[in-house]
Structures are given as structure tokens and as C-alpha cells.
Amino acid sequence: MKKLFLILFVCAAVQLFGQSTHPNPPEWAKNVIWYQIFVERFNNGDKTNDPTPESTTVKDMKIFPPKGWQVSRWTSNWFERQPWEQDTTQGFNSVIQSRRYGGDLQGVLDKLNYLEKLGITAIYFNPINDAPSLHKYDARNYHHIDVNFGPDPAGDMKIIASENPNDPATWKWTSADKLFLKLVDELHQRGIRVILDYSWNHTGTNFWAWQDILKNQAESRYKDWYEISSFDNPLTPENEFKYNGWGGYGYLPELRKVDITTERIHGLPYEGNIHEGPKKHIFDVTKRWLAPDGDVTKGIDGYRLDVAEQIGMGFWREYRNYVKSINPEAYLVGEIWWEKWPLKLMDPAPYMQGDVFDAVMFYQVYKPARDFFNNTESEMDASQLHDSLELQWNNIPGSNEYAMMNVAASHDAPRLLTDFYNKNRYKFKANPEENPEYKTGKPDKETYNRLRLYLVHTFTSLGSPHIWNGDEMGMWGADDPNCRKPLMWKGMKFEKEYRNNIQEGKKEYDKVKFNKKHFKFYQKLIKIRKENPVLALGEFKFLVSEGKKLAYSRTNENDEIIVIFNLENSKEEFNIPEGKYKDLLTGKKYRRTSLKLKPMKALILKKMD
């Protein structure tokens, strides 16, 4: 019934609103390798701009750093409480939200050679807008880069205070803004695209418009900007002020939705918009980063759009047309994730009709692939993987399936190694607090082997590969917040980390160190994909899908590559078309119509004649 609803919804919307003037994703987005950067935990390149207690405070929500708070040491044991953390009664997952490690834009600039050496071609930055939290989804200012990510926090705060935030004509460029634009230029010179993450659904309570509402209540000029159900009555001792916060979080007040003409059902699209006041501001901010001072050559290449299903489709259609009017080559990717956690992922199809997004974060193809390659409790064989992937791909227009962002790990999910170290249901109790049996330490040899088979798959499959910063270093970590550890850069000497971090008994430790072998495997796969465009743009066809044996081909007019996996417990035979082949993983050459492959092995066979 829901499927029928979605089909009717999409058809009606297309008839009513028409198609976008730019219905297809930009060509560049079909052949990229994404790298996601969480700036606060990426690299501290400038200790003079580190966060302060004042910059992390949210007074109206009574969010204050604990007594004695200080910036955490980058190389400390993640699970060991610092002195200031021991003086609070908060649990580990709560107190850890107060930590700051001082990552900044200079830290990214200092690692450009590393990124170029890795071989990635596009960067998706988690929010870097000005905000008090570590994650920056609680915007204090949409139109400025976080003051502690730039070289002069105090000077930037003075510049911001001199503006009228609701009037773009008064906006200036802070030192953090300028450093970001320098970073964009440096990345573009290296052939690396850049997109920014924004949540247009909500702000933080330090946001300037919300602060005006707190001060003036029903008399505020911004009183219609948010989902407010009642204002405070100054004549009574009680505080009657009530509003909606995203996910029930009071520090994330939601912007007001209007023109809602269809029922709002969690995990499904709905027809609606955002109030004209905040919408104009959003559009102004969008243009600011796409075309700084009116110059698209200096701007970013698109946006990743947070909790997209919370906003009505009418807004997204207008937003797409506006973005494409500024830069037709801009890329829009939406977060379309859970319909019903943890059982059912959303259907991305309504957002993929050429009038909303160019792509979504395609968790929908990771979940079945993890079940197959990791031999999880869900027990998926090759034929089921075949059916699951084809179901998802056939649900997406052909022009979009190549541009999908194939996300596996992220700031919101366990790191890949840890996700493969555990066999539980995807993103369900993926932490030791909810599941004492959940393994959080350095993975075993089998985990590395299984993950590398999955990586061969994702780098040879449809859609664009995605790397969560640090996964290529061999980092491990459970679900948020443990997936957000500071990156373990080569040459840094980290303290050993607790393996059984909350369980009783004698502590066990893991050595935390940059994994050269793992990094080189990522490098190799990236190089293979970049040197063989057929892996990005070629046709995809399943050849074998039985038991734990999987094979498929990628072909175009000039090239043919056959990818083979054997996850059985015994050596297995695979039949291939006659010809000369070279395994791009090992360099070994084959000339036969059948071959035997050892257990837990993969081949990327390129036809040489």
C-alpha cells in the first residue's frame, strides 16, 4: 500500500510542479571518489584558535563545559576520562560531547598532500558553519564558517557582531570564511570537488533569530520562523514557551513548515515548504558559498542536505531550481535514511525524479552488501544480494544511479572495521552500552579480510565510493560518538586504548597506530577505479550469484572487467568468457575459460584483447 502511495505521490507531483530545468546530475558526479571530513576531529593545524569554554556554551539550554574543562589531547586514550571528566556525574557518552580536540581548516590545508596521495577526487565536509557543538548541526550562524576553525576567533566574532544577519548586503568575510575559500581554491587546483553539509530543517538555540525570539517572544520579527506552539506570557510566573526541537532535542529548534498539503508520515515524503522568512535566508546563504561575490569559480560544488525527509518536497523543488540557476553543475545529495529504524530503510525514489536531488547517501545498497560480505546474523547469500541490489538500482533512474553516494560508514554509524568485526543487525545496538557483547577494540584478521572483499565490491560497483575520514587509516570505533575519534595520523604516538572499555575486569589494551597496509589497499583500489573509467561509467551485469559465489561484469565499448568473489569455505570454480585477462589486484595474468579461486579471495579481471 505504501509503495502505491509513493508512486501516486511522485506522479502527482511531477504533473503539478513539472520537471526541473536541470533534471540530470552533473557528469562529474558520476565518476568521483568521495572523502568525508569531520573537521573538529580531522587535524589540529593551529592551536591558537582552539575552542574555549565560552565558544561551546549554550546558556539558554544550560549547556556549560564541566569545571576545569580544557581541549583534549589528540593522542590520549579515547576511553580514559580526563581529570575534568572525572569530576562530573555524567555518563561517558554524555561527557564525551563536551570534548573538543581543536581540529580546524588549517589542519585540512596541512594534509592536502596526504589527500592527493590517497587519490580521492571529492570532499564532503560535515557542517563547518559557526556553531557551539562539535558536530555543528546546531548553527549559530549559517553564513559564516565556525570561528574556531579559522585563525582569528575573537576578530571574527567582532565582524559577525557588526552585521545585520538578516541582510546579506551587510555580510562580511571573516578570517575563517577567507581561509575556507582558500581551501576550496587549493582543492580545486588539485582536481578535488567540494560540497558542504547543511541542515535547513533546524538551527541551534544560539542562532541569532532564535535569540531574538527568546528576548522578544511574540513581539519578535522572527516569531514565524520556527515551529512555536506557544509564547511565554510575561504576566504569569510560569514559562509557557513551547516549540518543536528536531528529534525532541530542545537545542535544535525546527524551522517552520508551511503549505503542507499531504499527511506527514515519518520516513515518507510530504508536500510542503519552509516559511518565506527563513527560506530567503537559506537561499542567500546557499548563494554565498556557491558563488562568493558572484563568482562560481570560487565557490563550492554542491551541498549534502541533512534530514531531508523532514522538509517538504515543495521546498526541495524550489531549492534545486535555485541552486541550478546559480551553477548548473552543482551537486545535491540528500540524507534519506530510515523509514522505521532499525528494520526498514527509506525509499529514495521520490527524491530521484529529476526535480529534487541528484543523489542520496545510498545506505540502501550497503546494508545487503554488509550482510553478504560479513556473514552477519541476517544470513544473505549471493542470489539475495543480487536481488537486493537490482531492486535498489532499478528503483533509481539510470542517469542518477551512477551519481549515488555509496555511504557505508559515517559520523552517524560505526566505522567500517568495527561494523565488520560485529555480526549484529545493521546499526542496531552498535555500542557496548546497549550491547555488552559488542566488540569495540582492534579487529581480528578475518575482519580485515572480509572488509577488503567488500571494498573491492564497492570500488567496482555502480555509484561513487565513499570513505569516512580515518577508515583508510585502519581506525575502529562503535556507533556515534565512538566513530568520531581524532584521526590517527602517521607519526603520531597515541596512548594505548582500552579494548573492554566499560566491561568489568582487568583492562585490555590495543595499540593505536596508522595502518600502512590498510592505507595502501585503499590507494590501490582508488588507483584501479581512476585508471579504469568502465568501473565508474560502464554497464553492470551479474554473471554468477549462487551460495557464496559472486561475479559480475562492467563493460563499455572499449573495455570489459569481470569481478569475482569466493566467500565459500572451499576453492571454487568460475567460468569466464574466453580471452586474456589481467588481475588488477595482483598483476597476475590468465588465459582460460574457467579458473579456481581460493576461499575469501577476489579478482578484478581486465580483458586484455
Image (cartoon, rainbow, N blue to C red):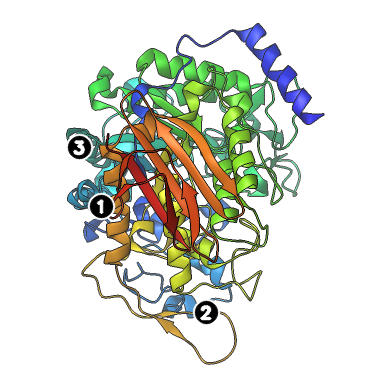
Residue toward you, 484 or 228? 484
Q: Upstream in the sequence, badge 2 or badge 1?
A: 2
Name the quarter where the N terminus is drawn. top right
Residue toward you, 562 or 288? 562
- Label 2 Cα neighbours within 10 Å, binned few <14 / some 14-19 / many ≥20: some
Residue 121 seen in render: no
Q: Distance between the Cα atoms at labels 2 and 3?
A: 41 Å
Say what secondary structure mark 3 lies in. Answer: helix
Can you identify the residue that label 1 sits on?
587
Q: Which residue lies furthest to the right in this view?
A: 1
Q: In percent of the image, x 64 and y 76: which residue is there?
A: 436
Q: In percent of the image, x 21 and y 57: which residue is there?
A: 46
Instruction: Locate residue 351, reporting x and y percent.
Output: 59, 25
Q: In percent of the image, x 34 and y 38: which residue is there?
A: 579
Name the quarter where the C terminus is drawn. top left
Give the amino acid at mark 1: Gly
Say what secondary structure mark 2 lies in. Answer: loop
- Horizontal side of 111 relative to 2 (left or right) equals left
Give the amino acid at mark 3: Lys
**Residue 501: mark:** 2
Q: Upstream in the sequence, badge 2 or badge 3?
A: 3
Residue toward you, 354 or 209? 354
Instruction: Locate residue 98, reporting x and y percent.
Output: 47, 63
* Position above or below: 21 against 301: above
Can you identify the residue that label 3 sits on?
182
Give the amino acid at mark 2: Asn
User: Pointers 2 and 3 in contact (CB under 8 A)?
Assistant: no
